Image (spheres, rainbow, N blue to C red):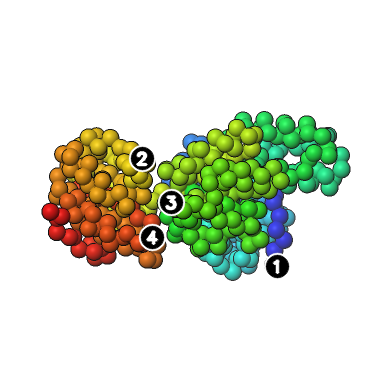
Amino acid sequence: MKHLPAFFSLAGHHALVAGGTPAAVQRARLVVAAGGTLTVAAPRLDSAFDDLRRQSPFDWQPRWPDAADFTQARLAFIATGDPIRDETLAAMARELRVPVNVTDQPRISDFIMPAIVDRGEVVVGVSTGGASPVLARLVRARIERALPARLAELGAFAARFRDTARALLRDVAARRRFWEHVLDGPIGQLVLAGREQAAREAMLVALNRPANERGPVGSVAIVGAGPGDPDLLTLRALDALQRADVVLYDELAGREVLDRARRDAELVYVGKQKARHSRSQDEINALMAAHARAGKQVVRLKGGDPFIFGRGGEELEYLRAHGIAATVVPGVTAALACAAASGIPLTHREHASAVTFVTGYLKNGEPAADWATLAQSRQTIVVYMGVSAAATVRDRLLEAGLARTTPVAIIENGSRPDQKVSVGTLGALTALAARHANGGPALMIIGDVAALADVAHAKPALAEAS
């Protein structure tokens, strides 16, 4: 370790920036963000200083700094753009015992500036000791992706209850365990999901709970796994999988997605296929509740998005009715993933101004759909779970007036390496569907936009059925 990592307080203190360059603007912004008062000394200022001045007025001395400027500063930043002048000013600062940073010159700097991840109360600094600022920025980018956007709100939330928790929990170890359960449990998840009022109510309950009842509190996250490509998991979904003690997963949650779960998490298959259910919905509901009441963090992992033909709404209602903390993490639904993977825009200014999602799953022998409305022009129809109902879908749309020549695409295993696309017309829909009868999950897109499919990766069109 070449440098001692430290966070320096500038609130209410003065800092000097020598230089009017774009690099000097960056340093000036950091001073202002940290609550310091700022003097900029340079004959000319880059135009970017104009925006900073409108937001946070500062003192500009239109000359290079002198000894008096340095003696008034707690820290100094030098970014003149002239290496010789930089070194002269750095020597002046050191002579006056003012810590100095010189942009891109760690050799003559007392301290270096890390790549910064700023989440309000939570700040992360990444440094390579000046060896490779670009590498530090790349590491910072990875951390940015990993940290929740509302981490600042979680830090502020904890600060509001800090004194109360200290007063109620005198034992240091007990207080640490309490905060671990809060920040890494359902209360923290509520804050990160933007439900601060619900988090506050849950926090008050937790603080007033008797000491012998302050053990782990379970919760359930209903998580959309997307179409099966692990790269299409949302950051929040990945975070939930990394926290989970138990993962109850569906048929459509692929192995590669499950591999993103915590290594010691218990994986429980609860998938349902047509006419073949490993668990009934009532059993799944009871299983979620039982694990949560045992103090476990549960992920109910569902293919696509939980609220698009995924029965996530029913599960959320059940959990709420039984007093179990639950959050929902949306996923990339199959329609969006399959359309993108096959090059089909679901809306297009020249072809479709609306898109409708329907399920082709047969209940009482007929898909529940308003066929007359679906057959109207300039819209896209996306049929989930519709391959086995292809003949019915074709017949009802033809009866409602949709042309036999209407373009159609069927996408199987959309976004996955084994993706299979067939394109044709509504009249040929049953023949197209036959190609996918024994394959993976498939989705039908009906409308003019289907003709825009990436035909280089699609099966050619079939002749219309007679």
Query: Camera-side residue: 267 or 431?
Result: 431
Q: Amino acid at mark 1?
A: Met
Quadrant of image for the N terminus: bottom right
Residue lying at 51% horizontally and 38% vertically, measured from the top left: 314
Residue occupying the far right of the picture: 171
What SS does tag 3 mark? loop
Q: Between disc 2 and disc 3, whose residue precedes?
A: 3
Q: Between disc 4 and disc 1, whose residue precedes?
A: 1
Q: Amino acid at mark 3?
A: Ala
How far apart are labels 2 and 1 at the CA level? Answer: 70 Å
Query: Camera-side residue: 239 or 362?
Result: 362
Which of the two marks, 3 or 1, is nearer to us in this view?
3
How far apart are labels 4 and 2 at the CA level? Answer: 24 Å
Q: Give the residue number, with chain letter if any, for mark 4.
A: 440
Q: Give the residue number, with chain letter if any, for mark 3.
A: 275
Residue 193 vs 98, above or below: the answer is above
What SS does tag 2 mark? loop
What SS does tag 1 mark? loop
Residue occupying the far bottom of the picture: 131
Query: Camera-side residue: 363 or 215?
Result: 363
Q: Between disc 3 and disc 4, whose residue precedes?
A: 3
Disc marking residue 85 = none
Q: Where, by quadrant of the figure, is residue 428 drawn?
A: bottom left
Whether residues under marks 3 and 4 lie with C-beta atoms below 8 angstroms apart, the answer is no
Disc marking residue 1 = 1
Residue lying at 68% horizontally and 33% vertically, measured from the top left: 202
Left or right, 412 with reference to 395: right
Residue 299 vs 228, above or below: the answer is above
